[in-house]
Image (cartoon, rainbow, N blue to C red):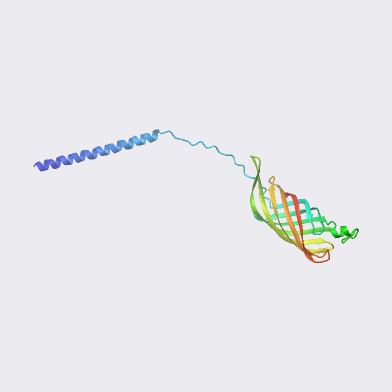
Amino acid sequence: MESRVRIFLLKGALGLAILASVAGCSRVTGTTADTRAGDPVIEPEVDRREIRRPRIDTENFELSGFAGFKSIEDFGTNTVYGVRLAYHITEGLFAEASYGQTEAGRTSWETLAGGVDLLTPSERKYRYYDLSLGYNLLPGEIFIGRNRAFNSALYLLVGAGSTDFAGESEFTISFGAGYRVLLTDWLSTHIMIRDHVFRSDVTGREKTVHNIEFVLGLGWFF
């Protein structure tokens, strides 16, 4: 009989313990929920920066004029000027056709000989025509001050064409590099150095001549 009473008491004590634990958990859960509901909402204060997207003309053709100096091997350095028409195939690749002209000076031999001319005035006219491919090697931006940025690109050029000089038309290979800056969405400026290479026998013996030019250009996208 005593064993039954003990079992009954143990069952009662176990039931009370379970009820107490359940009540305690519900109280803790309610307290936590009340605490979270009462917490203030913190909104981050982020200063948004105004970003201006570069307005670049979507047209692919670029017409430009250029002027500068050209060194004709054995005939000194003179002013050169011309035009170029470029077609931008992709963002990095473009093709261009260019025409330029200058006039050859006197060689040192002509100067020392006194009055002896190797070329007639018409033969001293130097004209060239080129078809080239260009690649924008390092596109980027240049900054003037703190608030003005201009899109720019360093590009390489290689091409072929013809040079009319000393009464002859010579097949010519050209190569060089340039730096382009977009001043507005339609106006560009260029700094370019290029070499025109061909075979010539004007001075009495045939050799490969290098005629290097340095020019500044202004272009228009259309």
Question: Is residue 122 among the parts visible in the rendering?
Answer: no
Q: Return the x and y of residue 158 as percentages of the image width and height.
A: 70, 59
Looking at the image, which is closer to me, 203 or 101?
203
**Vertical position of residue 39 compared to residue 157: above or below:** above
Looking at the image, which is closer to me, 137 or 186?
137
Number of on-image labels: 0
Q: Return the x and y of residue 168 as percentages of the image width and height.
A: 83, 64
- Considering the image in quadrants, where does the N terminus appear? top left
Question: Is residue 170 among the parts visible in the rendering?
Answer: yes
Residue closest to the far front = 112
**Vertical position of residue 43 compared to residue 219: above or below:** above
Q: Return the x and y of residue 122 as percentages of the image width and height.
A: 87, 59
Q: Is residue 8 left or right of residue 84?
A: left
At 75% from the left edge and 53% from the top edge, which residue is drawn? 214
Q: Is residue 172 left or right of residue 58?
A: right
At 34% from the left edge and 35% from the top edge, which residue is drawn? 31
Q: Return the x and y of residue 127 as percentages of the image width and height.
A: 81, 58
Residue closest to the far left = 1
Q: Is residue 53 left or right of residue 71?
A: left
Q: Is residue 121 left or right of residue 170?
A: right
